[in-house]
Image (tube, rainbow, N blue to C red):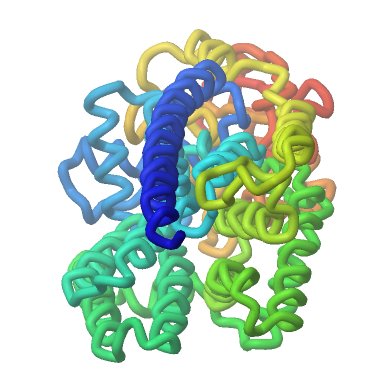
Amino acid sequence: MDDNKTPVKRIRAVANISRAVKQLTRSEQALYCYLGLYFLVNLLFLTAFPYVHSDESWLSGLSRHIATTGDIGVTEPFFNVYQRYPHAIRLLFHLLQAGFMQLFGYQIFTFRLISLLFSVATLYFFYKLSRLFCRSAGTALLATLLLSLDLQYLYASHLARQEIIIVFILVLALYLLISRIDTHRYRDDLGLGIIVGLGIGVHPNILVVAVTIGLGYAYYLYQKKISWRNLALLVLVIGLFAVLFVGLSITMDPDYLAHYTQQGRNFGVGDGLLGKWQGLLLFYQHLFNQFSIEYYMPNIRFQLLGFALVAVLSLGLLAKHRSTPRYQPLRLPLLLVFGVNLGIFVIGRYNVTSVVFIFPLCYLLTVLLLETVYPEQMPAGPMLNTHLIPEKKRKKKWLPGLLVLITAVLTLTGLQPPANSYAAYLRQIQTAIPGSPKILGNLNAEYAFADGQLLDYRNLQYLDDQGITFADYVAAQQIEVIIYYDELAVIVANHPRYDVMYGDLTPIAAEMTAFIAAHCEEITVFSDASYGTNLAPLIDARPWPIHIFRVTTAP
């Protein structure tokens, strides 16, 4: 009897392998088709959502200045009284932007395209990472679909900042570590160290990736799959890259360490453990309440509550079933979610845009938890032995569809492009200001001007401290045009609530308005509800007048 059953078992095994190969092939094809569709659809509203933030023109403006001057040691041309110091910590990002600028020109689309491309690459490797944990390719696709539809992820995928590149490095590094753990060699440590080390040239938030990867190494050390030498090599390689970028920064600015440390203190990086803990709690409170003066804040309450619930349930199941194999796949993703939060905590720079770092791993943990608790509800695969599940149960897989529906509805209802077009805003300014005069204005209009033509409002906060009057500043900088936004009056009237935007302008505000009244003539005035203010809670709240003045007489 046993001999007769052996051929049958072999046939079933071959059939299972065949089904697995076919499903994997179909899943890969579905992934490629979806990523292509994702890219094309996002191109349609790449510059419309979210509104163009002054951080984007800040970063690209420096990239343009580096490309124009051919000098990596320059600082932002729109800041002069606002003292800036050169460094190499974001150098690779600026060089990447400068390269794309040569191909597609100096426009917001160019720099947002970089973010979108990294978003697509992140989704691809996120699917590959999910396949290492999920029992079926269908569940991995579900995790990828949920992440791609998430509003916070779309926000980071469009914004011309570095967050999505850091997310890409995080997902790629985790995939490379986990996928090769059973054959881990020193060359893997070297490769991971290079990937994370290069991230230092993108943004200091690469520390979040380093901490998370470090916890991953600790996990595998505990499991005796790697040795301390592997961890030491990783740390050594990342450390060498840190020395390289810091050394390059010192060649640009001999006092770099002192300057960068002081800048970090200004943002709370130097706070003690208690201060950082309070900052982390306030960080999540602001995210939940959609509170930010500087940045657009999507409504992610549902995700935050859902992720917290998933983390607590996963921890509870692991604590209750410590030795049950069924729940063990939850361990590493839960640890990595903690690692991302620990990295954010260690940095202590609680910018609301950095919350996107938790999203990939939280979505992965979510689908893993559901696959563990409700396997019959998740997309089927050969590893689930679905032929053992009754036919009726196989047909009632409503949970994946419900998750996708909820995510899509939350995104569609929260997707709020600005009421006014950014291109129209720039056209109105360019029409009113022909030629290349020196201009004092808002950094969000930087794309309308040539390199070095604009001086930003953020300089004004330092005039009083340096004993410079507004009239002297205009004369010394040979400013010919002043773009006055009525938001300035609101900011001064609500001092110090909105000082985070341009600094304290109260000492200079009266001088500025008096100078405009006595020495300028109005060229034009127009209103723009979206780009007439940088105060995020007040964007599209009302029409914001924008006055363009020509300086006619010297004081």
Q: Is residue 23 left or right of residue 73?
A: right
Residue 92 spot, x, y in % from top left: 27, 52
From what the image shows, is residue 225 above or below residue 372? below
**In x, y percent, where is residue 384?**
58, 51
* On screen, residue 321 above or below 108: below
Q: Nearer the viewer, residue 204 or 448?
A: 204
Residue at image location 33% in from the left, 52% down from the top: 75
Does residue 367 appear left or right of residue 56 in this picture? right
Residue 300, given in percent of the width and then of the height, sits at 75, 47
Does 469 appear above or below 246? above
Front residue of 521/447: it is 447
- Asked which quadrant contains residue 284, the reply is bottom right
Residue at x 43%, y 30% (from the top left corner) = 26
Q: Give me the residue at 48% from left, 21% from top.
A: 37
Residue pictured at 37% horizontal, 14% vertical: 435
Can residue 355 be seen in this snapshot? no
